[in-house]
Image (cartoon, rainbow, N blue to C red):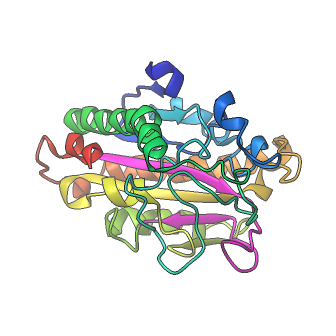
Amino acid sequence: MSATIYTLHRGTRPLLVSLPHDGSAIPDAIAARLTPSARRAPDTDWHVSRLYAFAHELGASVLVPRHSRYVVDLNRPPDDTSLYPGRNTTGLCPAVQFSGEPVYLDGQAPGPGEIAERVRVYWQPYHDALAAELARLHAAHGRVVLWEGHSIRSVVPFLFDGRLPDFNLGTADGASCSAALQDRLRGVLERQSGYSHVVNGRFKGGYITRHYGRPEHGIEAVQLELAQARYMDEDSYAYREDLAAPTQALIRALLEATLAQAASPASSAPPPATHASKQGLS
């Protein structure tokens, strides 16, 4: 069953890369109820697993889902509490696309019972795997960093004003990781000039970053939201190697800095052994 929901590559170093919006599959029974534009799964984080393929070489674990966020959004809380109260956003089983257009045909949106079933079938297995892998790495190293890899169109008026910076780091305003790790990552971005960046701007980290990040227990979490224009054609969804290669190099520098920080004695913290395994059960 798990192979149809996600794939997990188990690494050897204290880093788990989670790519919860990489999936684009939509079961036929659900797709038949979607609007024509939604059937293309336009709000997918296109090609992020390709961008992060090098993470295997670094010894990181990598977790990737199969299904689209239109089936269920793995980066939303199971009770669908808004992550950004008062702002436009999308929910656990989105009814609105990032364009503001409907996801479902009239009268075809899922009700509470169907949403609960999608959580059981698709959402919970991913989070069980995520929590278990965090626990494994945590037990092996005494600390672990969860890296949330995301991407989005560079201009989405429904969600934010203007053009999004190229690299958007989110740490829940510093609550999901140590100040040392945040400062090290900020330094990587500040030492380059090819990409715009922001820390804790419009995207501060979604449910996964906020829920699992417990730096005081040796479990840190960081989200990176990339502007898709820096590695692909946003209209055709085609991957562009000429754009992607330098973008990938900067992502690699960020992950290498993350691992260097995780190896620092100052990163050590005496966590309870059961903490990571508890995080996926809410």
Of 34 and 278, nearer the camera is 34
Q: Residue at x 53, y 53 (%)?
A: 254
Q: Viewed as shown, does residue 247 lie left or right of 81?
A: right
Q: Quadrant of residue 191?
A: bottom right
Q: Position of residue 257 (x, y in %)?
A: 46, 53
Of 25 and 93, nearer the camera is 93
Q: Position of residue 63 (x, y in %)?
A: 48, 34
Q: Position of residue 144 (x, y in %)?
A: 31, 45
The magenta region covers: 144-171
Task: Work out whether residue 58 can be spotted.
Answer: no
Of 163 and 120, nearer the camera is 120
Q: Viewed as shown, does residue 196 lie left or right of 237?
A: left
Query: Quadrant where the N terminus lies?
Result: top left
Q: Position of residue 186 (x, y in %)?
A: 50, 68
As for residue 166 lying within the magenta part, the answer is yes
Instruction: Say above or below: 205 vs 87.
Output: above
As for residue 163 lying within the magenta part, the answer is yes
Of 17 and 57, nearer the camera is 17
Task: Work out whether residue 190 can be spotted.
Answer: yes
Figure disc tally: 0
Instruction: Say above or below: 89 vs 107.
Output: below
Q: Residue at x 73, y 50 (%)?
A: 105
Instruction: Say above or below: 199 vs 117.
Output: below
Question: Looking at this rendering, what residue extends furthest in the front direction?
Answer: 107
Q: Residue at x 55, y 63 (%)?
A: 188
